[in-house]
Structures are given as C-alpha cells and as structure tokens.
Image (cartoon, grey):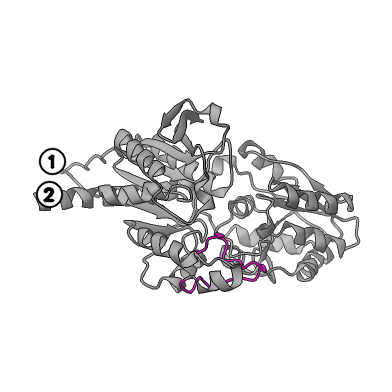
Amino acid sequence: MRRNRTGKPARKKLLNILYIVHSFYPESYTGTEKFVFNMARSMQSKGHRVKVVTYSKGALESYPHAVGEVVYREYDHEGIPVLAYRHQHMDPADTFETGNPDLTLFAKKVIEMEKPDLIHFGHPMRAMEFMQTSALLGIKYVITLTDFWFICPKSTLLQTSNALCPGPEMGENCRIHCLLPDAQQRLGTHIPLLRSASKVISPSASLASLFQNSLPDLDVEVLNHGMKYETIRANERVYQAGDPLTLFYGGSLSPHKGVHLILEAMSMIPTDRLKLKIYGSGPSDYTELLEQAAAADNRAALCGLYSEEDIQQLYQEVDIAVVPSIWYENYPLVLHEALASRVPALVSDIGGMAEKVKDGFNGFTFRVGDAGHLAERILEILDNPMLLNEFKANMKQVQIPAIEEEAEAYERIYHSLVRSKVKSKRRKR
C-alpha cells in the first residue's frame, strides 16, 4: 500500500474518466454496453467523475446541440451522465476511413470540455476520431477488447461463408473471403491506434490469444468480467429421472449468435419433456426466421427482452442455458449470469464459451455450428437429468469474480497510468 510522508495510507486521487462506446442504453443494451455501464457506475461510487460518450442513431430533431455537422444531447442513465452524438449526414460505421473532419472537431471539443485524466474505450466503432485525438493530445487511453473489430471489419472473424477466419493476414483474407478490397487500408489506420493504447485488456484468454496470433507484439492483459451478485439467486433445483427440462437462450438475436441451431436441434428431439425459451431482440429478417421456426414447434417460445430485475426469477424457471454462437464469442455475459445462478450450460466448443464451460464438469460443449451434435448433448441430459445435479455441485467449486473485484482491478490500472503520466511530465520539466 502506498503511504504518504506521515506514514498513513495515501488517499487515492479522484479521477475524471471518459468512457467511450459505440452504442449505449437505452438505445442499445448488449454485453459491451453493460460492461461500460458497470464500470462507470462502479467508478462513480468510488467518488470518481465519469461520463459515457456514445454514438446514437436517434432522430436528428432529438439532438438540441450541434458542433458543425455533428449533433448531440446529454442525459442521465440511472445516474450516469451520458453524451450521445451523431453525424447529420453519414454513419461512420459505413466507411473504413478515419479522421473525418467533423467528427475530429467534435472529439476535440468534447475532450477539451471534459478534460479527462484518461479515456477508456469500451468499443471504438464510430469513435476512432476520439482515439486519434487522444493520441494527438497525449491523453492516455485504455481499450477493452470485446470483439475482433480492430482486426476484422465484420467484428466476428467470420468469413462471408460463415467459416471461421484465422485472422486478416494483412487484409488478404478479408479480400479473398469477404470481398473487402480496402481492408488493408483499414488495418493500416486502426492497428497503430490499438498499439498506441496505454493498456489493452481482454475479458477472456481466448480473445487475447486470437489477437496475439495476428499481432504477436501486442501486449494484452486478461481481466475477466465481474458479476453483480445482488441480481443473482442460485437455482437449487434437484433433478430426478424423467424430469422435464427447459432450455434457455438470452441475448442478441443475430445470425452469428447461432440461435437457429437450438430450434434445429429441438426439431430432432420429438418429446414433450423439452421446452425452449428465447429472450432477446435483433435484426428483423433473422428474428422473423426464428419466429417461423418457433411457430412450428409449440414447445418453443420467443419471450422478448428481459431486464436486470428479471434475472433472479428467470433463472429459477430454466434448467440449461444454451450459447450456440458460431463465432469466437468473447465472454458472453448471459453465460456468466447462468453459471453464477448455478444453471449448467450447453455451449459451442470455441472461444470464451469453451473457456468457461468444461465439457462434462459444469455443462457440455458441442461442435460449433452442428445442430445434430447439440441435439445429441440435449438427449444425453434428457436421458439422465441427474447429470445436472453433478454439474451444479461442480459449479459450487468455481467462484466467478464480483463486479467489485473487476472494478478494483481497473481502478488500479487507471491510477498507475495517471501516475506514470504525472511522472513523465515532471521529468520533462
């Protein structure tokens, strides 16, 4: 512990922290947004000044302020101050180019107005001008990797055929397998800004490893997400032979999440002892396909969205969480919630999913993209529901860290970076 000259523990400096993310509540509510909100709320509770800056797609008339071609508004989300902005005439996500003069001017204005001690990027899509401006002004920034956006224009390392991609290979794989001829140009601007971060953090070892396969010189620290235990209640159900089972999926309803695989697997298992509850939202075309498949099976239901307040009850009503993603999922927070709630999981055998679910210990893995193999694993449990008792007993042995632990680790990182910045300034004098 650091101590001052009197020998007493030194008081930590209160920091001014800017969090930047590609979308945020209430407009968007996936795992990245939840992570940013959790960290902002944790730092605020410690006395630090925080603000979330996010891109937004609201109607232009809903933004009362403007800086050139960029409009913005400010609001609070559960006590966290938020600044939401958008360009009036374009979506930055539609171009590989960075350094847009309108967005650069806006980023400079915001940073000069907020005067942050450091900036934490939860996701820099549509916000690269903030990263460029931070580097130009000498403001230290932290990046938490939540997908493959820096090295993959599609963010998922999935080729157009939905085959897993080993990495961009300087844009060559992007050109051949995804028909993206400008990917090399994109990598040329994005990778230097990733390397310029004062700290790069990954919530999972698998995501860190895949980045380092493409960028061997990149130093990535692994720091697992924490769980908000106030919202968790353990599922204490004990299973017997012949028990009915309810499968659960929660999260984004997007093709790369593989939700269709659960419905395909259900169609191979003609039993009335099995039900499926799907929670979430997503693109209308994919959601409609899921709705059609669910309508053909009266055991399956699309249940809409669920909130943090619903988590305790929801996990009392289900028996197995299914995470069937067909991409190298980073660290699915819904899987986190399920395991903390002592609900065993069935997950694809790649990425952060296989990192958290050990086959035969706290659930089962199945071959990625293989609905038939998923059906086989479901049948194993249907034939012997008492397997779930073993999984649940094993889950008690593994404690998922709390959000408070995650926040403590980030706070230490923040302070170390700010101290090193102060020391650097002193040496220059």
Q: Residue 378: x, y in percent?
A: 79, 64
208 left or right of 383 in image: left
Q: Which residue is mark 1?
A: 6
The amino acid type of the residue labelled 1 equals: Thr
**Is residue 82 in the magenta section?**
no
Which of the pair 401/189 is nearer the observer?
189
Q: Residue 418: x, y in percent?
A: 26, 48
Which of the pair 149/69 is nearer the observer?
69
Q: Which residue is mark 2?
A: 426
Q: What is the secondary structure assignment of the residue under circle 2?
A: helix
Q: Residue at x 44, y 38 (%)?
A: 52
Q: Which residues are magenta?
A: 152-170
Q: Which badge, 2 or 1, is on the more N-terminal residue? A: 1
Q: What is the secondary structure assignment of the residue under circle 1?
A: loop
Q: Residue 372: x, y in percent?
A: 79, 70
Q: Kindly indicate the quadrant of the structure image that contains residue 185.
A: bottom left
Residue 15, compared with residue 154, is above or below; it is: above
Direction top: furthest residue: 64
The amino acid type of the residue labelled 2 equals: Arg
Q: Is residue 318 visible in the rendered structure shown here?
A: no
Specify the label residue 305 is tagged with.
none
Q: Between label 2 and label 1, give the one nearer the viewer.
A: 2
- Crowding around mark 1 (Cα neighbors within 10 Å: few <14, some 14 to 19, many 20+) is few
**Magenta: main secondary structure:** loop
Q: How far apart are the two marked residues, 2 and 1, measured between alpha carbons?
A: 23 Å
**Is residue 160 in the magenta section?**
yes
